[in-house]
Image (cartoon, rainbow, N blue to C red):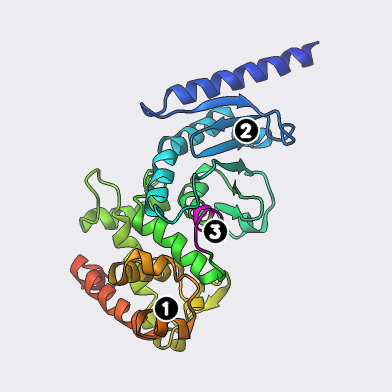
Amino acid sequence: MRKGLRGIAFVMALILALCCTVSALGEGQKYQIEENTGDTRVSYPYKVVTESAVLYLAKADIELLGEEAFYDGMCKLLENMEQDFADAREVMKGFLNGEVAPIPIYTTFTGKSEKATDGVGAEYFGKEKRIRLYMGWDAAAYSLLHEYAHYLTCSCATFEITTQAWRECIAEYISKIACRNNIARSDNYGMDEQEKEIFAANGWVDEEGYPDFKVYYHGVAWVMEQPVTIGAHYVAVCNSVMTMTETQQEHPMISSITYEEAGCFTEFLVERFGKDLVFTHLNVDGKGFQETYGKSFEELFTEWKQENTKLCEEWGVVSLMNGN
């Protein structure tokens, strides 16, 4: 009997915590708390239903973090998720195959995924059309919009992307450049205190004092093209860990560029040639660039590097990195 009463108390506390969380969210946002009656109900007894997603809450994760920490983190994410997902759909307007169904999102904080081990905060599974969140809410904050962009471009778009490199290029562009990414912004994009102090000291902040992520993102892309990074390990858009070389910097291949370079270069293409052309040619290889854009990938990438350097000079990134 006592065990049963404790179980009832746990359920009531859970429902109360969820209701309190939802009532604390922004005005005009619609959320619904439900018991999960599906096949996953044993591991995921509850779900949060929004216009854009169904968030499945793992009982093991609640126990891992503790109820207060779990729901505080969930609330923080939900405060911005709907707006971010709506912004991503707006970027894709005209390229979506009808209405976008809400995407299932599962917390998997206690999981032993290889992705979690590699420091990945979230992952999109194309066949199942779902996202899993790893390592806690803060870790997921930086990755979630990128994974939602994968959902839109790989599963909901009128075009098809057949290469891993282009999947990452467009997802980075949508989540890091075209959208404000309020989820990541509210967590200062995962920056540590020293990085935030540097941004504040140089005036690289937005109207509310958050780090200006475009300065950070373009700045990292610029640094990766400098001699100082030769020999450094990085994750390329082909989804492999690679070593930066002089050859990659001087004669780059699209499959071997960094994620930051990918997002900025896609922005460059969209601004130069327009979204209609770029979004419908997300499978072009080396020869395809010449046919589509009138220049090779290397030529266009070099032009982007020149423009990005000028931008970083204007912001003072180059001077700071050079010790001036």
For disc 3, the neighbor class at 10 Å (few under 14, some 14 to 19, many from 20) is some
Name the residue nearer the viewer: 305 or 324: 305
The amino acid sitting under disc 1 is Thr
**Quadrant assignment for the N terminus:** top right
Q: Which residue is mark 1?
A: 229
Instruction: Look at the picture and state if 255 lies above or below 64.
Output: below
Q: Residue, x 50% and y 45% (percent of image)? A: 100
- Ranked by sequence position, the earlier of labels 3 and 1 is 3
| Residue 270: assigned label | none
Q: Position of residue 289 (x, y in %)?
A: 42, 81
Instruction: Give yes or no for residue 154 being in the magenta stretch.
Output: yes
The residue stretch that appears in magenta: 151-159
**Quadrant assignment for the C terminus:** bottom left
For disc 2, the neighbor class at 10 Å (few under 14, some 14 to 19, many from 20) is some
Instruction: Locate residue 293: give its quadrant.
Output: bottom left
Q: Does the CB distance between marks 2 and 1 fall below 8 Å?
A: no
| Residue 62: assigned label | 2
- Ranked by sequence position, the earlier of labels 3 and 2 is 2
For disc 1, the neighbor class at 10 Å (few under 14, some 14 to 19, many from 20) is some
Name the residue nearer the viewer: 167 or 274: 274
Q: Residue, x 33% and y 61% (percent of image)? A: 216
Instruction: Look at the picture and state if 177 lies above or below 311.
Output: above
Q: Mark 3 or mark 2, which is nearer to you?
A: 3
Q: Which residue is mark 3?
A: 154
Q: CA distance from mark 2 to mark 1?
A: 41 Å
Q: Residue, x 57% and y 37% (percent of image)? A: 55
